[in-house]
Image: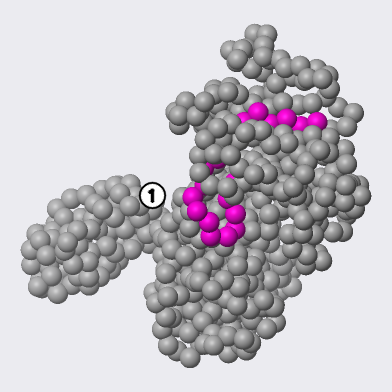
Amino acid sequence: MKIFTKSGSILTAFASLFFSAGFAQTQVIVPNDLKPVNDASSEGWRMYSSGNSTAQLIAVADFGIPANHGPHSIRATRPGGSGVNRSLIGYYEANKTLASLERFSWFRYSENGTDTYLNIFINNGSSIATVVYQPAVTSGGWQESVFNSSISGGLYIRQYNSGVGMVPISYAQLMNQYGSWVIYNHPDGLFTNFIGGLTIVSGSSSPTAAQTHTFDKVSVKFAGANEKVFDFVSAELPPPPAPCAANEVVLYEPAKQQDGSDIPAIYADPTQALSYPQNDDNSTTVNAVTLGFGGTLVLKMSSAIKNGPGNDFKVVETSGGLTSAICQRHPERIMAFASQDGCNWIYAGSGCQDVELDLGPLNWASYIKLIDISPIDGIFQGEGTPNGYDVDGVICLNSYEENPVMQDLGALYATGYSDFNQGPRKNGTAVPVDRSNPSKVLGQPENTHVVNFASLGFGGSIILELGYVVFDKPGNDIQIVETSFGNPSCKSYPEKASVELSLDKSNWVTLGATLCQDGTLDLGTAGMRAAQYLRVTDRTLASKFNGTADGYDIDGVVVLQPGCEYTPAARTEIQGEKSKHALLTLLPGSNPDEYQITGSDELLSSAHSYKIINLAGQLLAEGKIRQSADENTLPLLQLKGLQTGLYFVCIESENYNETIKLLKQ
């Protein structure tokens, strides 16, 4: 915590103060002194708002409030209305008992509202209690409230594990029963954020009128220590942003209810997943959006989720009205993905009902994708028509990333390998060393007639990892490139392999067909929504080869349908009001650098222009083409100079735009 004193500081208005208890130095809190609200380990001040409340460090003159205690204060405002709407200004020192708190005072200027009080969170190692001190409110002037041994009235206690509500209690009774209990940083179960053990609260969890209170000059006196007097200054930096939650719906694709019917409109509002979760399974109002069995929701966060210790974000689910909705009775499940750009995704894990998940290889994430995987044939007790996972919201667990820098984990090719179990050659000898390096399988396939591959050997296998998750889309999703010198046919040189796919490297699904040399994979044929790992196993029949043959040779893997087909800039450039479904075909010519565009005479009769764009959205080539003598073709496209890889050929005429994927080998 920064301490600004009289000497050498611009903050001379906050001079040293003297009290009868001894010397006490004014300590000034500026925005960058505030601790992260979800940091349970450190001492100091925290400021936090929930619902429609706001708490901010302000210059009081800007709001017409007398600056009796310095030029700045903390202002807590809420417009009124239902829901959990509170501003919390908390202070914490470790290892302090309730009895050691000799004095806690604060000044308050109340413009309107009476819902403001002091919460002191305490525990004895097994039980939790809250001391509530709520003095009467005077409006239109600064008022000092003091919690010490001379208080009378406005004192309540709530002990959570006994079900006791707000019971009035005297100070003597409080110290007798709870004086040895320790003040602690309280984890607010609604938001998984920690707030100070000594917390000034404005607002409540019940519907009330509007509240506006300004707080300043807080003092804390523990036994055996000097009194600390705190002023607040909105200088140097703006207030830290609130902990991140979802604030934008990117995609909502609801599926059906268990009986095949549509989700009722009242449950199909994806904005219910925005802002902070209500986390109230007993609410009589709808506070979540329903996915349906197999539905998808993509949310963008207000701030980038930070990858920190342990799990990084939490998905809160609502099982409306079911107080005992354990997963065995109510198996609503999701699998979750995280992304920095909304295009390329990592798999974060799966879970039932509320679930906390980790970002894994991502330093941070701004997008969360949730896909319902609830068992459609499951038994959902206590629910009318089961309708899948209900998303209340998504929040950060390790605060937000202040300086997010984009990562590139590799969107197009294999980026890692494991479990390389190489088999022998047909004659039983080991595969030569130059064919036994599995790192040659990583990155872009060379597709040349040199030893740039890894041989599996007869019966051998390898697990390949893709940089990002591949989602099932129409058509083939992945290509495996195999090397057979001289490009023989499969019939004459049948090197074969089977492929299994996995999302988590634990649960595997086998694709039915066996690949012969090069092959393509469609996740949909295996009933998979997404995959990130491939296990390739040699299935070559030894009797078809001579003694030195070494089985299936993997050159590499290509993702045919990466997360985003092209950047928004490229998409804007090649699309418009014209039809995007001209149904053209791009066929290889007689050499690797030539491609033939074919289609109907009606489609090809007008002048055309073309553009070639890479996956980064960069324009690599463009030109004009006209119909050739053969009425069903356009002149050959010449792609000399382009490396092997995936490109987009954009054809435009007066009547249509067409974008064709091209894998140049």
User: Residue 81, position in %: x, y?
Assistant: 48, 58
Please, what is the three-letter code of the amino acid marked with disc 1? Ala
Q: How is the image coloured?
A: one colour
On whether residue 619 falls in the magenta region, the answer is no
- Do we see residue 363 in this rendering? no
Q: Is residue 584 left or right of residue 432?
A: left
Residue 225 in the figure: left or right of residue 654: right
Dominant secondary-structure state across the stretch colored magenta: strand
Task: Give the class, few, some or many, for how many residues have Cα within 10 Å of label 1's Cα (few <14, many ≥20).
Answer: few
Residue 579 horizontal side relative to residue 122, left or right:
left
Number of marks: 1
Q: Which residue is mark 1?
A: 616
**x then y, percent, for residue 585:** 25, 70
Quadrant (top left, top right, bottom left, bottom right) of the C terminus: bottom left
Q: Judge by depth and name the residue closer to the eye, 152 or 545.
A: 152
Taking the spot 68% from the left edge, 27% from the top edge, the residue there is 230
Task: Residue 547: name its quadrant.
Answer: bottom right
Residue interval drawn in magenta: 202-221
Magenta segment: does it hold 210?
A: yes
Instruction: State the residue at coordinates (68%, 47%).
Output: 134
- Is residue 270 in view from this perspective? yes
Residue at position x 26%, y 48% in the image: 621
Q: Tag 1's secondary structure? A: loop
The quarter of the picture where residue 324 lies is: bottom right
